[in-house]
Amino acid sequence: MEKIPCINSQWVIITDGTNIFDSEFRSGALELAHERGFHNIRLMRDESIVDKSFLTRKLFKTGCGGIICHPADLPALRVAAKAKIPVILLGESAVSEWRKAAEGPVTVCSVNNEGIGQMAADYLYGQRRFKSFVYADYAPDAEWDWWTDRRFRSFTETLAEHGFQGEVPRIPATATTPDEDAARFLDALKDLPRPIAIFACNDRVAKDVVDFLELGAIRMPSEVAVLGVDDERDVCETAVVSISSIKIEHHRLGRTAMTLMLHMLQGGEHRDKTILCPAVRVIERESTRRLAPTNPHVAAAIDFIRATDTRKLSVESVAKACGTSHSYLSKNFKRETGLTVLDAIHDRIVKDTKRLLRETDISVSEIAEQMGFSAPSGLCALFKRKTGTAMKDFRRKHTL
């Protein structure tokens, strides 16, 4: 493993935020640093302290090597530049201002927000079934809404390129109180032609939207489909309807940023460049899953799985109800839905289990019995495998 003895007396200050960008980015950066034998990392929870005063009083005395953070104070960039402290900035909100403040090259790491909007439009429009498109995000905030603006513009522009000529409403999902937000959001949807595709700026907003739709008794994904961003598994797979999401390689971006930082600490040039982390792919789950089969036996199987008591569901019972053989149904069901018949049954069981955990206080044993399991352990194992969380943990977080 490569060692870097020449910089072991220096420290790198790195962002320690709680959102998925910061957490996965930090993980990748730390991983790369440790692989290279560099362990002098200080995690910084409050980036607002990185100002001119902090640099002058603290970092010069402790031999700070470099800083990786979201920019919060332009005078601090001037101080860092004059002291030749390497700085890598996260985000693209004002790159030209940062370069002006630093009076020189600035290295920026961010995600490709335009690419995210384009991927969302390509994926949703590609289903060829939606009559309306909606963009959901937070209430406007001039300090940080640049990234969601870019996703929205790219989403609408790409839809137009595909031939969609309608307006794309931009609806805040979190503006006031949860009850008011839900009522306002559902009211904004009521007159739109269905089915509707909703692209949420991230998974947490998508989770709010799914909750609103559930309260409004709107069927997903047949009436309204929801797509998020970031693929936060604990958010996407614990929602009452699991959320499809665009995956981004934040971890890889963190490794790239730390590679550049170590290069600069060893005397390499300060590169004037912006590195964008691309959207990788859509992780498809229930909220957008295509369920419009052309095979009548597959359509009948889907309807039977949706409507039948889970205690009576099995691959054999589904095939019998559809009047076809086990092998014929399995082959065509997989081709048209991307799922096996057993996966579809399990998805139905998990969805009903989520509802009972959220809306009732009956025991796990009673829920398992209602779902057709002879022992609670079987349902608990299925639920954990499908959602990534235990049933008791899900209930504690999501009880209405």
Image (cartoon, rainbow, N blue to C red):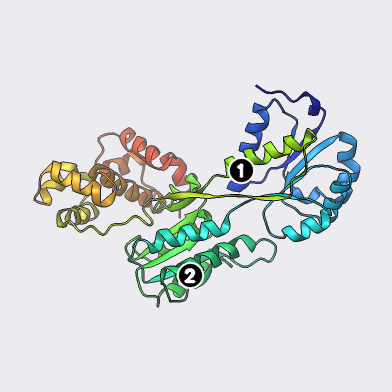
* Helix, strand or loop status at disc 2: helix
- Give the residue type at disc 2: Phe
On-image quarter of the N terminus: top right
Residue 375 lies, in percent from the top left, at 28, 34
How busy is the neighbourhood of tag 1: few (under 14 within 10 Å), some, or many (20 plus)? many
Residue at 32%, 50% in the rendered image: 352
Q: Is residue 90 visible?
A: yes
Give the answer, above or below, for where 17 lies relative to 210. above
Residue 339 lies, in percent from the top left, at 28, 46
Q: How many marks?
A: 2
Give the answer, above or below, for where 287 lies relative to 182. above
Q: Residue furthest left?
A: 323
The circle drawn on residue 103 is: none
Residue at the spot of label 1? 253
Residue at 20%, 59% in the rendered image: 294
Residue 10 lies, in percent from the top left, at 81, 32
The circle drawn on residue 185 is: 2
